Image (cartoon, helix red, strand yellow):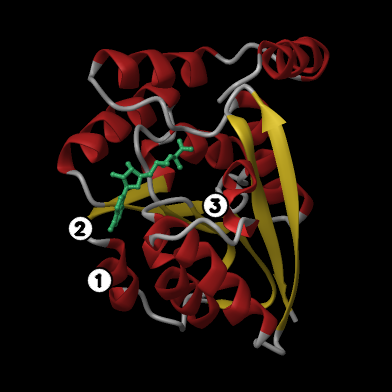
Amino acid sequence: FIDDNWVRSDQYHNKFLLKDDAALEHALQNSTASGLPPIAVSAAQGKLLYLLAKTTHAKRVLEVGTLGGYSTIWFGRALPEDGRIVTLELEEKHAKVARQNFEHAGLASKIEVRVGPAADSLKELPSSEPFDLVFIDADKPNNPTYYKEARRLTRKGSVIIVDNVVRAGLVADPAQEGEFVDGVRELLRDIQADAGVEATTLATVGEKGYDGFTYILVL
Ligand code: SAM
């Protein structure tokens, strides 16, 4: 469910705070034209991810769930010249569209797309090259696995961000069952039991509905 008022509010704020970006627009249009689902982060959320990457002076970003690379391009915009992004995607078709979008954005040299189940791709990444920021936004039942791998691949001061943790309040509704809400619930228990992090959930409401991010700082 998406309320018109939420959409109008997002658009109102964006008008003041976001600049037109042809490459980001192209990424969305090309993704839609290629038949990808409209499940990228919103523009305002993308800008938040960009600002968080800048604020933390991130140089190495790991993304789980590429789709057409919309959020990846936001990160690419935030990174310094020698910055690098590794983004993981299950679907070859999504990866292909994403690579086109990275070329178009002039960011292809900074971004490596690895295709396959993210749980496998993550295991191939060495902890000797930790990431400054990890964005988890793929299949929700695997969130606990992705969190465990993200912890292995980060260091003190790194940030891990997980998307879609509120789901219009369904995650907190005891009447709800199923692997989507369970994946988030288990993730929250894992974070609670992890003495090496501090975290909070920031609920978001806007053109992508009522959802939220969990923001985790590695201590
Ligand atoms: N981060 C993207 C953005 O905001 O532009 C949106 C990512 S979309 C919500 C989730 C993506 O995760 C989809 O492209 C889907 O194919 C991918 N995905 C689903 N299961 C996966 C898995 N097991 N391993 C890797 N990627 C997966």
For the residue marked with disc 3, what is the amino acid? Answer: Gly
Instruction: Tell me the quarter of the picture where residue 218 sits.
Output: bottom right
Residue under the point 57% across and 35% down: 74
Residue under the point 58% across and 56% down: 171
Q: Residues at badges 1 and 2 in contact (C-beta under 8 Å)? A: yes
Going by the picture, which residue comes out furthest to the front? 175
Residue 78 is situated, as x and y percent measured from the top left of the image, at 64, 41
Q: Nearer the N terminus, badge 3 or badge 1?
A: 3
- Is residue 155 visible in this depiction of the protein? no
Figure quadrant of the C terminus = bottom right
Residue under the point 51% across and 37% down: 71
Q: Residues at badges 3 and 1 in contact (C-beta under 8 Å)? A: no
Which residue lies under the disc numbered 1? Answer: 120
Residue 135 is situated, as x and y percent measured from the top left of the image, at 53, 55
Q: Residues at badges 3 and 2 in contact (C-beta under 8 Å)? A: no
Which residue lies under the disc numbered 2? Answer: 116
How far is the residue under mark 3 from the one under mark 1?
24 Å
Mark 1 residue element: helix
Which residue lies under the disc numbered 3? Answer: 83
Label 3 vs label 1, nearer the camera: 1
Mark 3 residue element: loop
Label 3 vs label 2, nearer the camera: 2
Figure quadrant of the N terminus = top right
Identify the disc placed on residue 144.
Answer: none
Residue 80 is situated, as x and y percent measured from the top left of the image, at 62, 46
CB at disc 2 and ligand 1 closer than 8 Å:
yes
